Image (spheres, coloured by chain):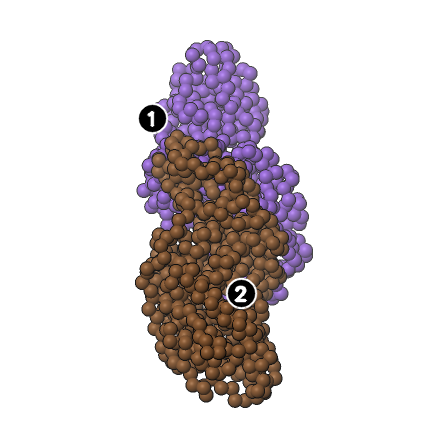
Chain colours: A brown, B purple
Amino acid sequence: MTVFSLDMINAARGNSPADVIFSNASIFNPFTCTWDKGTLAVKDGIVLGIGDYTGKKEYDLSGRYIVPGLIDAHVHIESSLLTPREYARLVAQHGTAMVIADPHEIANVAGAAGIEFMLSQRAELPLDIRYMLPSCVPATPMDVGGAVLDAPDLARFKNREGVSGLGEMMNFPGVLGGNTDIGKKLEIFSLRDGHAPMLLGKDLNAYILAGLQSDHECTRKGEVEEKLKKGMYIYIREGSTEHNIEELASLISPLTVSRCCFATDDCHVDLLMQDGHIDRCIRKAIACGVKPELAIRMATLSAAERFGLQDRGALAPGRRADFCVIDDPQKFIVGQVFVAGKILTDIPPGTETTLQSTFRCTVPSGDAIRIRSIGTVRVIGIIPHQIVTESLVLPVESAALFKNDILKVVVCNRYGNGACGVGLVRGFKFATGAIASSVAHDAHNVIAVGTSDDAILRAIRAVIGMQGGMAAVFGDEETNLPLDCGGLMSTLPYPDVATRLQKLHEVTDKMGGIEDPFMYLSFLSLTVIPSLRITERGVFDVGEFRDVPLFIE
Amino acid sequence: MTVFSLDMINAARGNSPADVIFSNASIFNPFTCTWDKGTLAVKDGIVLGIGDYTGKKEYDLSGRYIVPGLIDAHVHIESSLLTPREYARLVAQHGTAMVIADPHEIANVAGAAGIEFMLSQRAELPLDIRYMLPSCVPATPMDVGGAVLDAPDLARFKNREGVSGLGEMMNFPGVLGGNTDIGKKLEIFSLRDGHAPMLLGKDLNAYILAGLQSDHECTRKGEVEEKLKKGMYIYIREGSTEHNIEELASLISPLTVSRCCFATDDCHVDLLMQDGHIDRCIRKAIACGVKPELAIRMATLSAAERFGLQDRGALAPGRRADFCVIDDPQKFIVGQVFVAGKILTDIPPGTETTLQSTFRCTVPSGDAIRIRSIGTVRVIGIIPHQIVTESLVLPVESAALFKNDILKVVVCNRYGNGACGVGLVRGFKFATGAIASSVAHDAHNVIAVGTSDDAILRAIRAVIGMQGGMAAVFGDEETNLPLDCGGLMSTLPYPDVATRLQKLHEVTDKMGGIEDPFMYLSFLSLTVIPSLRITERGVFDVGEFRDVPLFIE
């Protein structure tokens, strides 16, 4: 960026007054990780500088601390269950000024129209949304979703405002196999996010050599160390159910901080409302021993540098005057928020046109989801607070199903082919009932888990009845949250979405389930994260990258 | 960059052998500033990775250290007196893999044709030369050189291979004045180098706000601290006569190192041959207390990051296999050099076409350079090892001229307008004789300094006779170095240029002069660096940015 107007230059020189000055502030400087006392001057939403400026308006910050606008390096907005506009209304209050979002979910449902919808929502928000285009629609060649986006489809978006690069390349087997369409996608963009959970050694070398520059899937220290050393940017993730900061915090140092950012990846609206967004990541990092100044640098300048943004990430001349006020860096509670130099004021809830989804799903028959045999089975093992799963091998008699926390999980194709896959999962802890959802990464078929076939079918029926949504069946009670926008997002205002999700969570609590079961459920069909998954075809082994039978012969 | 070929991917995965492996090496990792033992594998000039690779060929490094190819963040190749090809032959031996060069000098002489000449020389060199286009031709609106390059002239070069951005914006008064042509130049490029010696406070804010991102002119600690805090990249300079490392070394820390690079700016061929290039900067920094690992990070990854080069700066997968071998990081003596995985072999000296310069200069009359008055005069004071000068005010009788180290300095326009300016300078220490040169930043007129009018005129005559070059007049003896390429560079092989420059220096030593007097002389006409300068119009005050009379009334 260049801000080359005589008016601005004169104001920066102090020859004419700023629009507004923020006096008596302790201003975070991410270049030196220091707090500098001074007066911040802003004109036309741009920082003029810090110095003895005068302004037409003055905010006396009385010694409080100000921090540049926070940046989320990788997020799927759809996972909040909110539209981009509602998402912006919510996270802006937490000091987030920019998110780098991958509209991967809506693209898997609705293709280019889904991306257009997300782009159309960027305007006039208190949050700057930049998109990394979804690289894997469908997630793998074996998955069947609502669309296929090949390299020419993505190339059409290249020079669109708000498009920054290529989103997480989940199909690492495709990369390692030299898939030519993947090669073409990589050539279109100079910024390319990776996705390489547990990929190490020479296969990781090959993946990086192919052009992938970042990873947000690290769960172990050794993994971060290796990926950092090999030149990847590391986005340390803290999502609704993906908690990586605690394990990785000790790796943040003055030397590594410039190559590390925060990412929230997938967060439900209720978590965002209750606990916050990137501010939550900073608090968590501080609680895990990271110095506040390093945590804030990660959330500001490091992210701006990674994405080549010279006009963000710091309160320095020529950069956007996005910032938030805090009372205590160690506690990092966001108070007032300023967007382009103006105090954040709420915008009205969206009256936006929604995205019509083609929802063509039928309730499977009882026979279709019955497990007749007895023997040794593959069971998906949920790992608390992680997105990766275990691949368990357990002896099961049909009578043992729905006992010992081994529940049935069912995926029904929502795009009209009638396919239905059945598997087993351990870890939800439901004692009764079932839940179902049309949020099921990445094809977003209908997925259900429950304690009886009957409850499972009822939950699926409820989701189909809403043409997409979330449902919980508990006794005679049916509770739901319609997701009218592509079966992924609600067009309701965010507080209403949070309330309805909260009601669902109250019911699942009563059913004995773990916290946030819908988030875990949504990942069970994600064929790009180890170890065991469930698709409309049945059980899928990510390590072997193939469908495997439920029963081991 | 993306290196997406199945062949490369398979080799990175270890499924097929590398072209060459470098075993038993301690490999510098700039991401963590550590030395990692391992085997480096290379194919097609690209790093596959570090690991248990096999190769068609093996170099056993027997425990020695290898360091990624060094990068000079800002240099004027012309100042070496060599053509780019000869310059590359020389600095590649010192481990330099890339220079970010500003062809500002040749452009001031020959305009777009000068830039074309520099671009034409990039091919098939052991050095990757990237150009930042000269932003100030002429250096200031008051200077008259061989060309004027306005924004449309530069825009034509924007997408040329080898062009990276906009070179140092010296005309900071123009920036601060909101000059519209400068604004247009800034808008063309996203990478923009600054030049802001001693610019601080709100004027510095305005300069940065206008879009300038770096500075290589810092001479003081406080200046670096302020510029770092305001978001500038700092290139710490160590040129032939511009020595800034010693003063600034203590500011290099794990937190700041990612925003700091090295630059050599202006180095004569003899210094490069005797003392080295960026390797010299690293040694100097280490001698000044910087940890070797931080100094090497500055010279590698930090520079690559600043210029957005994802394929340089580290020996990591997908990056160019440029590196050098050293025996001891603390001593940093460059041994073998590898360019794209191959051992450096000398290329033949250039038989290149030269750049014809229009050299239209006449020897001034004795009257034209005579100083008739006596009184109080402005005298340019040379500061050893610095590019900045002092502005002295001294009482002088005409009889005192050429005594007490106060010498006459003369600038003659070389573009045909016949102008001739006369001033006084202290610091050269010549006891007899005179020197003259057609290297005189930035217009590159003929400049001379000497102990008598007669010797000065003879030296000027010698330079004109060569149609550009350097000359020393000592008694009856005349020694010279023709600069047949635009009056700035010699097309001779670099060892011959060094030998002839050495002979000049032997003569200037005999004359009692300071070390490297031609470099100091070349900067005396540089109207963009404080404090006092000399032009074809006479004495110039940089602070006041105007011509001033020699005599103070």
Camera-nearest residue between A111 and A183: A111
Q: Amino acid at mark 1?
A: Asn
| Residue B465 on image: x %, y % | 42, 29
The chain letter for the residue carrying disc 1 is B
Left/right of residue B97 with respect to residue A417 in the rendered view: right
Residue in the picture at 46% in, 22% down: B409
Left/right of residue A203 with respect to residue A16 in the rendered view: right
Residue A525 visible in this rendered orientation of the protein? yes
The chain letter for the residue carrying disc 2 is A
Q: Is residue A94 above or below residue B214?
A: below
Residue in the picture at 58% in, 58% down: A245
| Residue A544 on image: x %, y % | 54, 76
Q: CA distance from mark 1 to mark 2?
A: 76 Å
Q: Which mark is residue B417?
A: 1
Q: Amino acid at mark 2?
A: Thr
Which residue has dot 2 on it? Answer: A241
Residue in the picture at 54% in, 75% down: A430
Among the 4 quarters of the image, the one containing residue A443: bottom left
Where the N terminus of chain A falls, by quadrant? top left
Residue in the picture at 41% in, 34% down: A55
Camera-nearest residue between B211 and B316: B211
Residue B461 visible in this rendered orientation of the protein? no
Q: Which mark is residue B529?
A: none
Among the 4 quarters of the image, the one containing residue B295: top right
| Residue A162 on image: x %, y % | 38, 55
Q: Is residue A322 above or below residue B391?
A: below
State the SS at label 2. loop
Camera-nearest residue between B327 and B140: B140
